[in-house]
Every structure is written in structure tokens, then in C-alpha cells.
Image (cartoon, rainbow, N blue to C red):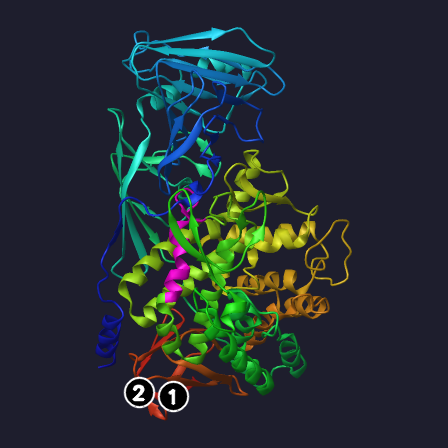
Amino acid sequence: MIFRLFLLALALFSSPLRAQTQSPPVGFGRFGRINEDGLLTLNVTPHGFSVPGMFSPLEVQFGEGKGKASVVSLNATEKRLKIENGSEGEPTEIRYSLLYPGFSATFGKKMRLRIVGKTTLPVWTFLSNPKERKGLAPGIVISQPKGGIAVAVFLPEGKKAKMASVETEGNVWMINGEFEEEVNEVRFVTVDGLQVTSPKSIRDVRDDAHTQFWSRVPVPELQSTEYAMTPDRNGVTITETYKTQTNGETISPIPPTLAFAAKRGYPVKFDKKVVYPDCITKYGEYAYVQGNVLRYTLPLPSTEERGYLRVENADVKRVALLNSLVGHLGGDWVKNGVDLAYAGMTNAQMAWAYLSETNKTALTSAWKTYLPLAFRLPPYTSEPDKTRDTWKLETEPLSGRSYYWTYFIHGPGPHRYDLDWGNALPLYGLYKYAVYSGDWETVQQNWNVAQKIYRYFDLGDDWAWMTVVNSDTGYSTGTGDPLAATYCGHWAMLRMARVLEDKAAETQFAYRLARCAVPATMRFAMTYWAREKGLIGATSQALGFSEAAAFVAVPMGKDDPWNVSSVLSGDGSLPELFDAMIQFDRKNTRRYLDEYAKFYPDWFKPDVKYPFETNYAGNSVYVTFPHIQLRSLLGSDSGEALWNYAETAEKNRNNAWVAPNVVGELLSRDAPLTLTNWTPAGYLDGSVGANGKSVTLTFDHNPKYRQMLLTARLRPGFTPRTFLANGQPSPFQVKDGKLTAFISGGGRLKVEITSK
């Protein structure tokens, strides 16, 4: 009977989900607002291209670089430009692409390349004539004599073309191409990717297998993306369909971030053999499958909650410490969506079971006051919205797509950065409010607005990075915290969609979360790879991606500890991110913490003075406490050591409001279980009996919603013997250390669990 009940309940949670299709890919990705863009291996403008700055300098200008560019089309994988009023030899069209280790440009009857070496004259050689080596398009290869990146210039095959060098001008070669026909697509390809070519081998590049291969492969074009949940709802299958414009070898490229992860054991499943052509990009290895369809299945990261139970014999001083850290619960300063729907409320909410009655009252009041104001969109016509002006509607000019934003920081140029951070945290805060209060009516009322806020993540999604850009110019993913916040924003939207039983939204958010989990959890592994490839410094930490420079990175031990720590914080410690890091790359997550402790040996000491400027008062709570929670979750530090870190670091209370959930984590290490789901009920209280053998939980369940699903991770030694719901025996199941129970009935629910 119990088994049948579970089958029936699981069926309610496993109804089929339809596939969704984007055709063509929606959004602007990194190609918004400006036309100076970084591709997989080269940086391009309407007037030419260059190799990334960490390599021997090489710049190529088209003619005199006078052409005026206008966007013909763009999406998350490519941008097409029309060039007008250019000088002789400039292209008439340029096609940027993220699907290829280069790009293409269309010329008239003349092509003029001004090849510049900053300090030395570049070297170049003719490619073989097709008559000499079958299938190899004519053209040239350019590099630096002191070792640099080799760029092949493939002329259109089958068309009569003439290449001739012109005398040098200082460190400049002037090379002309002449064609008999009016339209000539020329491809500029880094045939070895970002691998340095020695001076002696430049003339060998023209004959090697890589050059021959890329001469046959045109630039692919993504036609459509389809994604669907797997039957068990624990993964997402993604199907991308490609085409090529000419009769060449057809390939379907894999995002380099994913190709990198797959090569290092990330649990992605491809339906075809993956080919790695020994081509390094800024963001991982280039890889592809043969044919015009790429299909792969990504696992969903853990979607488990972390609900803490109050241990009745917990140290009263440590409970008092937790409550003393609660703060930032609103006031006259609140204005943007992060202030109104996240701030100190979310971190305190996660420690609910340990909050004093005074703090519970203050927290409840803050949610009631500010959350309704967080999800009101313009136009604002009445107070207090008129003066608060929480959300702004912006149109990205090159695509004409509009999105909302609430927060930004300044950066290069007159542009806005960290838009993703500002949009993600209110969504995460809304979820945390609902999952503890059980007020899913508020989520339902604001669901349409939440999805409009989320729209930025669809429009700004970058195919190569598998996550959103932090500015509508592209630019980067910012320092570590925007990507951390973005990950948890996806996570929260998926959790809310499931409670609201919005199947289409669930599929969409599962797709985004599964993709974002790859860069969010592989940053540590990428750090060590990027060091090896010379893309960042030998002791630098990669925080996120950069269009032009491969990574946003800072040197460990020589930079603000906050910057190095930002990979762990979304504006406080977000345990869902840590769960995913441990799930997919435990080894390198541990290695990061060990390196951090090596370069910052006094990392938890509150009064350390650094010889450089710091953003958050050095080793403040804001910087140190995410490290403490991650160390706790990894399980390699003793409880005594963790408490020593926390009780020492708490004395530097800069932005200490981020810490209550971390202290809650430490206090709950002695609890026999951690709640991992209780939706759609609200979690009112949870406590552990003095003998550690009994647990009492209190929930508030709105009968409008389906039955409550209760799950928990059990610690060794706690084996449930009885399970009572409002005093009545209720079926439950224990498997692989996880307790699962479906509970019917509305209103106040009291659950009592006793162990053998």
C-alpha cells in the first residue's frame, strides 16, 4: 500500500514536459550595443582584428579602416555587419561568429590587409595552391617571428584570386588581394587556436593537417535550439541544428566551456563521438561532432534546500552570535530590487529556526513592507514607487530587444555592468520568502513580473560561456559574484515554477540552470588550465569570463581577498551554489580553498592589514563567511576548526548581515537531519529533542496546493522508526540516506520523527 502511494505521488511530480524550441536563437548575448567584440580566439572590430593581449601583438586592419558599420542581424552566436563608405580594399560585410575559431568578411574585387606588429615585423607565407595540395584553399598565414598566434587567411576556393605583398612600412606589411568576381567571402582562422607558433614553423603551418581541415570547414550557422526535460526531470536534453553556407565539411560545434568540462569528467552525455581538433579557444578546447545536429544531455544540479533544525542543547552564546548578525532589514536607504527583495532578509530567513522572537518579528515585518514594492514595474505614477524608481526598461539598440534592470556598477565606457547580479537576487529572495512562509500566493501574483525581470537572462545568454553577460555590451561575466547570483537566480526560478506547476517555465529554467551550472562549477578547474595555457597569471584566480581577455582574473595574495573570494558569494553565502560545486568538481573546489589559505594564511583573522586597498575592510564577515560554509559542506574541517574561524572572523563586522545562515549551518551540524524540501508548505519551526533521537517539525500548508513533499538528508545513526503527521502515522521511505514522505491535509502540520 505504501509503495502504491509513492508511485501515485511521484506520478503527480513527473508528468510529461514538452520540448521548447528557439529558432533562431533569441537575444543579443555578447554582441549587443557596440561592434568591438571578442570571439573565441580573435578580437574583432568593423575595421580589423587582433590576437588577445597576452600573446605576441598582431593586428590586422582592413584598408584604411574608414568604413561605417551597421548591424544586419545578430543573435547569441553571431553578428553580421554591413560596411559602407570604406576605403579601397575594405570589406562590404563582416560576419562575427562564436561557432568557429575565426570569422569571415566579404570583399569586392580588392582586399587590402595592413598587418601590424607592435614591436617587430610580422611574418607571413603563402598557402599552397589547390593544384599542389588538393582541397587546400589559397591564401596566406600570418604570425609573429618571436612566436605568436597563426592566422590563416583563406580565399574563396574555386575563384581566381591573386595575392601580392607590398613593401613594408616600419613594422607593417601591406598585402593586397585581387579577385575577378564581385563577391568574395574570405575566412580568417586561427588554425591552431591560441597555441603559439614558433618562428621556424610558420611556413609549415600552411601544410599541416589543421590548416587543411579548416580550409574545408565553412563557418557554421545555428538554425535552432530545442530543449526538453528528461523523463525523470533530473536532466535536460538539448538539440542544436546547424547549417553551412557553402559546400564544405559540416560540423556541429560544442560550446567551448562544455567541451572543456566534458574532457574533465563533467557528466554530460553526447549522442555522437566528440572530436577535439587540437584547437584552444579563450574559454576551453574547441570541439564538435560530425554532421549538422548536436544533441547532448546535461544533468540538473542538486535542487535540494537546506532547512536547519534547532538543536535544543546548542551553545546559547553561539545562538546569540547568530542573532546578533541579523541586520540590513530595510530602511530609508532601500531603493533597488536587491534592497527590497534580498538584502539582509534572505540570509536571516535561511536561519529561521534559530532566530529570536524579536528577529522573527523584524524579519516578517521587513518582508511585508518591502517585498510588495520590489515587483512593481514602470511606469511609476504614484508614491512611493514614483520616487523609488526600482526598475528601468532598457532597449538594447542593435537587436531592438528590451529588458528590465534595477542595479548596475560603472565600468569601461558609459555602459552599465553587473545587471545580472541585480536581476537575479530579487528572484532568489522571492523564492526564499515563499519557501519559508508558505505564501505562494505572492509568488503567483508576481509570477508574470518575475519572468519579465528574468528576460534579461534569455536575451543576454552567451552561447560560448553558457551563461549571461553582465552588460548588454557583452564585455564579461564580471567578477565572481554576478555568476554566483545568476546561478542561484536560475535555481530559484526553477523551484518556483515547480511549485506553481508551470510546465513550460519549468523546462525553460531547467535549461538555463543546467547550462549555467557548467561555468559556475568549473571555474576552479578552468583556473588551473588557464594558468597552464598562459591565459592568466601563474597564481591568478579566474573569476569569470572576458570577451577580449579570456578571463576576469586576479593574482592570489597580491589582490583584495574579496576579489578572490567573490567566486563564493552572490552577496552573501548561497549554499545552492556550493552544493553544485561539490557535486561536479569537489577536487578543485577543495584545491581552491587550500590555495586561498596558502596565499592568505591569516584569512579568518579580523584585524589583518593588507598592503593594498580592500573593498570590504579586509577579512570581514562579508569576505570570510562564505569560505566557512563551503568548508563545512565539504566536511574536511572539524567542527572545532570551523567555530574557531567563525568566532574569530565575526569581530570584523563589515556587512555582517550576510552571516546568519552560515552560523545556522554550523549550529545544525549536530542535528540528525537537514531538510531538503517541504514545498508547497511553509516551514515554521524545527527542533531536535535533547537525546538527539527525535525531531519535531511544524509547517503551514495551504490546501489549495497539492500534497506536501517532505525530504531530508539523514546523518549516520539516525534511522527513522516512526513518522507522525498531526499525531497520525504517515507513510515514509528511506533510501540512500534520504527520507521522503508525501503529506496530505491543509493548515498547520506537525510532523514528529523518532529514530530507532
Residue 664, how many percent across, how many down? 57, 74
Q: Which mark is residue 749?
A: 1
Q: 689 or 677, which is in the foreground?
A: 677
Residue occupying image coordinates x 46% and y 67%: 380
Range of residues picked out in magenta:
449-468
Q: Secondary structure at mark 1?
A: strand
Q: Is residue 215 left or right of residue 523?
A: left
Hey, which quadrant is residue 105 in on the image? top left
Q: Is residue 267 left or right of residue 114?
A: left
Quarter of the image for the C terminus: give it.
bottom left
Q: 707 or 51, which is in the foreground?
A: 51
Residue placed farthest to the front in the image?
A: 381
Q: Secondary structure at mark 2?
A: loop
Hey, which quadrant is residue 207 in on the image? top left
Residue 342, how many percent across, how many down? 52, 68
Q: Does the image show residue 717?
A: yes
Residue located beneath label 2 in the image? 745
**Of the residues shown, which amino acid type is indicated by label 1?**
Leu
Residue 343, how many percent across, how many down? 56, 69
* The magenta stretch spans residue 39: no
Residue occupying image coordinates x 72% and y 66%: 652
For mark 1, does the 10 Å Cα neighbourhood hold few (<14), some (14 to 19), or many (20 or more) residues? many
**Of the residues shown, which amino acid type is indicated by label 2?**
Gly
Q: Compared with residue 663, is residue 45 higher up or lower down, i.e. above or below?
A: above
Q: Is residue 213 left or right of residue 570?
A: left
